[in-house]
Image (cartoon, grey):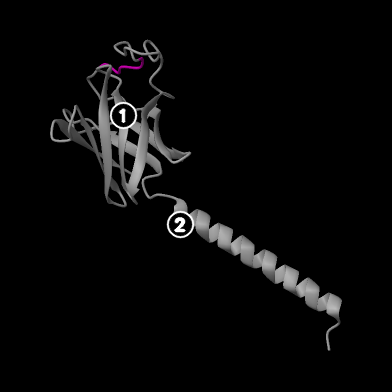
């Protein structure tokens, strides 16, 4: 028969292992599928134009430009020269262009704003994950009906 100290040690081991597995499972479940790096596609050229990293911080979705992708034959805009806020004249790479979005359901975020760094305009934004490789990003003024949707891909 096991002595009481062995039983207590075994109980503590099982409790710690169970807590670790529960926390790991909870963290895995809380990651929204939109989190990660997405490639934007220019509507005019149908070519990739940038990479955006989407992160969740304190329940808010943040989008940061990680890379600009030059299109052959076009001048690459590297600074937000037309911005009207504190981002004016700043490099676009590393810039937060999306913020304030709150999750409505897994893969759906709304209520924030997105900056078009080439035009310097800020729009309301809603994003919807179409599938695991496609994200619809809708920038609009006033209501979603008055805007345009850009498709981002993993």
Give the quadrant of residue 39. top left
Mark linked to residue 113 = 1
**Would you say the magenta stretch is mainly helix, strand or loop?**
loop
Rate crowding at label 2 as few (under 14), some (14 to 19) or many (20 or more) other CA atoms within 10 Å: few
Where disc 2 sits, the SS reads helix
Give the percent coordinates (x, y) of residue 152.
Answer: 27, 39
Q: Are marks 1 and 2 in contact (CB under 8 Å)?
A: no
Compare residues 79 and 108 and report the one nearer the observer: 108
- How far is disc 1 from disc 2 in space, using C-alphas? 26 Å
Which of the 4 image quadrants contains residue 109? top left
The residue depicted at 35 percent of the width and 36 percent of the height is 101
In this rendering, position of residue 11 left or right of residue 51: right
Q: Which one is nearer the viewer's eye here, 11 or 70?
A: 11
Instruction: Identify the residue at the far left of this view.
Output: 145
Query: What range is drawn magenta here?
Result: 75-79
- Image quarter (top left, top right, bottom left or bottom right) of the N terminus: bottom right
On the image, the x and y values in percent for residue 54 come to: 40, 38
Q: Secondary structure at mark 1?
A: strand
- Looking at this view, is 77 or 15 the one in front? 15
* Labelled disc at residue 29: 2
**Which residue occupies 30% across, 35% down?**
111
* Image height of 109 relative to 97, above or below: below
Please state which of residues 73 and 53 is positioned toward the viewer in this rendering.
53
């Amino acid at each position: 028969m096991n002595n009481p100290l062995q039983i207590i040690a075994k109980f503590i081991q099982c409790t710690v292992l169970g807590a670790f597995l529960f926390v790991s499972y909870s963290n895995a479940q809380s990651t929204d599928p939109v989190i990660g790096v997405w490639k934007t596609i220019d509507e005019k050229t149908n070519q990739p134009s940038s990479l955006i990293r989407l992160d969740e911080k304190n329940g808010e979705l943040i989008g940061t430009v990680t890379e600009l992708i030059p299109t052959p034959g076009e001048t690459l805009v590297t600074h937000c020269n037309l911005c009207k806020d504190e981002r004016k004249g700043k490099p676009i790479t590393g810039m937060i262009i999306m913020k304030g979005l709150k999750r409505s359901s897994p893969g759906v975020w709304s209520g924030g704003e997105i900056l078009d760094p080439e035009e310097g305009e800020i729009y309301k934004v809603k994003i919807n994950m179409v599938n695991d490789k496609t994200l619809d990003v809708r920038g609009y003024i006033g209501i979603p009906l008055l805007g345009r949707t850009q498709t981002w891909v993993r």
